[in-house]
Image: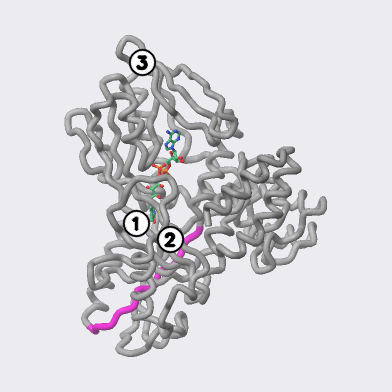
């Protein structure tokens, strides 16, 4: 936990436009719960030490109802508030990619490892497939790091058909509600449901995100939230709030797979923290898995230190604690005012651009000035300029890249994304000069996602 709190502080420093402190409220219904939670949170504050981003405190039932007016007031004794951090996962991911590109890394999108190349019993390279052009590529490598999340065992099997699986995965379903239940700066957490789970409501891109489940799952590329998971989330929040939530109250749902290390081989495992695990195979394949998004930087540092040590590379100091991510340099809280003023964009759009792209928002706004100011959907702040920016600067190759992982429209509002898709495909067709067949393929594959 100490490591995660430390990394959280680093993330807030390196990407101030994308990450933010977020206070979280926990409602309490029994008088004895207040001192119990206060003591626990005092320890959390102490553990966070200098990295603490706000002091936890008690909240009266009146104050709680002010924050969450749609909460059922019966038996509410008030609650506690503590501080955590929040960021947008897909935007953080693409921002890391951009930062690496700016510093000279080669980053490939839609390129899959299909097999590994061995020479004299040692790993020497990999066969890759560009899944868009269907081109096969062979690369040589002195060291290969397998960081494929839930898919690490598939790569380990390419290295050694007898490799024992080290992962299980659990699915986590999420629901975006039509009703806004949280204020923009306060989440709502149920730390222990009747069956021992954690559930939350979080303010997310001006909407309310409800989650999550934790169920054993199969490993697959596009996991979907199952109806029983959705019903569980809706049912549980109906107990706390004045609405009896049904499927009609949902804008969008999705699911993710958590990589859980179940069977690391004790003999060759460097267990560097409780959370992530690094292993090396007999042929030299290094696998890193488990962990948390929050600790991504430490996972990378530990893995490279391990590789340098195991393969006797020349060590160099790790710099990532201090490298500002793309858009962080020159970012200021008043950036959105500047963008509104200079580029004539509405306030919600300029706020969205500055929080999403940081100082890179100026480049996006530049495209907007050139005639791409139109919103992708009237109820959302995403604009056409972002499509062109994502193709030029963020390796966006398909409509789903734009609608799911550069903007978050499909995650927030499925129907809005559906209605925006034709224009996204049209702009991509113009930029990439797609022929008719490619346009049809893209329309169909996009329809499949829904
Ligand atoms: C529901 C849910 C909630 C979570 N909540 C939190 C949270 O609150 N805080 C937190 O810190 N963490 C959280 N996590 C955990 C966090 O999201 C994961 O730990 C993290 O995403 C794992 O990152 P990864 O890079 O190891 O794997 P991934 O993000 O899954 O990335 C693996 C990549 O490998 C690629 N790949 C797979 N096979 C191949 C191949 N053959 N060739 C090339 N590429 C390949 C995939 O396309 C993918 O891009 C949550 C996870 C879930 C599912």
- The CA span between labels 2 and 1 is 8 Å
- The CA span between labels 3 and 2 is 49 Å
Q: Is residue 300 left or right of residue 194?
A: right
**On residue 118, which mark appears?**
3
Q: Is residue 253 magenta?
A: no
- The CA span between labels 1 and 3 is 46 Å
Q: How many marks?
A: 3
**Magenta segment:** 20-31
Q: Return the residue at label 2.
A: 53
Q: Quadrant of ligand 1?
A: top left
Where residue 381 appears, as percent x and y from the top left, is 66, 63
Q: Which residue is nearer to you in this view: 211 or 320?
A: 211
Q: Which residue is nearer to you in this view: 83 or 87?
A: 87
Q: Is residue 182 left or right of residue 165?
A: right
Query: Compared to 32, does 129 lie above or below?
Result: above
Quadrant assignment, res 326: top right
């Amino acid at each position: 936990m100490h490591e995660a709190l430390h990394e959280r502080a680093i993330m807030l420093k390196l990407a101030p436009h994308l990450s933010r402190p977020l206070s979280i409220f926990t409602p309490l219904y029994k008088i004895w719960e207040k001192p119990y939670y206060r003591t626990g949170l005092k320890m959390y504050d102490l553990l966070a030490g200098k990295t603490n981003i706000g002091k936890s405190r008690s909240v009266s039932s009146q104050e709680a109802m002010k924050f969450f007016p749609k909460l059922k007031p019966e038996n509410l004794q008030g609650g506690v508030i503590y501080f955590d951090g929040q960021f947008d996962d897909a935007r953080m991911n693409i921002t890391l990619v951009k930062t690496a590109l700016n510093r000279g890394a080669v980053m490939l999108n839609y390129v899959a490892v299909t097999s590994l190349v061995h020479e004299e019993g040692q790993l020497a390279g990999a066969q890759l497939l560009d899944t868009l052009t269907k081109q096969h590529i062979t690369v040589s490598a002195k060291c290969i790091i397998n960081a494929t999340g839930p898919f690490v065992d598939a790569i380990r099997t390419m290295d050694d058909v007898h490799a024992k699986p080290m992962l299980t995965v659990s699915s986590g379903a999420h629901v975006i509600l039509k009703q806004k239940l949280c204020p923009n700066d306060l989440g709502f957490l149920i730390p222990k449901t009747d069956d021992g789970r954690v559930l939350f409501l979080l303010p997310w891109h001006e909407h309310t995100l409800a989650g999550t489940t934790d169920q054993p799952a199969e490993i697959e590329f596009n996991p979907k939230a199952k109806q029983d998971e959705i019903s569980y989330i809706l049912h549980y929040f109906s107990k706390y709030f004045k609405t009896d939530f049904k499927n009609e109250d949902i804008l969008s749902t999705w699911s993710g797979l958590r990589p859980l290390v179940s069977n690391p081989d004790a003999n060759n495992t460097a267990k560097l923290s409780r959370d992530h695990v690094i292993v090396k195979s007999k042929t030299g394949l290094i696998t890193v898995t488990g962990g948390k998004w929050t600790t991504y930087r430490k996972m990378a540092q530990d893995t490279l230190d391990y590789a340098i040590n195991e393969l006797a590379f020349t060590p160099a100091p790790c710099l990532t604690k201090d490298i500002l991510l793309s858009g962080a340099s020159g970012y200021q809280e008043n950036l959105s005012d500047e963008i509104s003023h200079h580029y004539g964009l509405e306030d919600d759009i300029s706020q969205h651009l500055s929080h999403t792209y940081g100082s890179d928002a100026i480049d996006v706004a530049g495209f907007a000035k050139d005639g791409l100011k139109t919103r992708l959907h009237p109820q959302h702040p995403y604009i056409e300029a972002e499509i062109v920016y994502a193709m030029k600067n963020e390796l966006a190759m398909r409509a789903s890249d734009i609608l799911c992982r550069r903007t978050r429209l499909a995650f927030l509002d499925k129907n809005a994304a559906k209605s925006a898709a034709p224009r996204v495909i049209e702009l991509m067709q113009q930029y990439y000069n797609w022929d008719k067949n490619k346009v049809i393929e893209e329309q169909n594959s996009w329809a499949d996602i829904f």
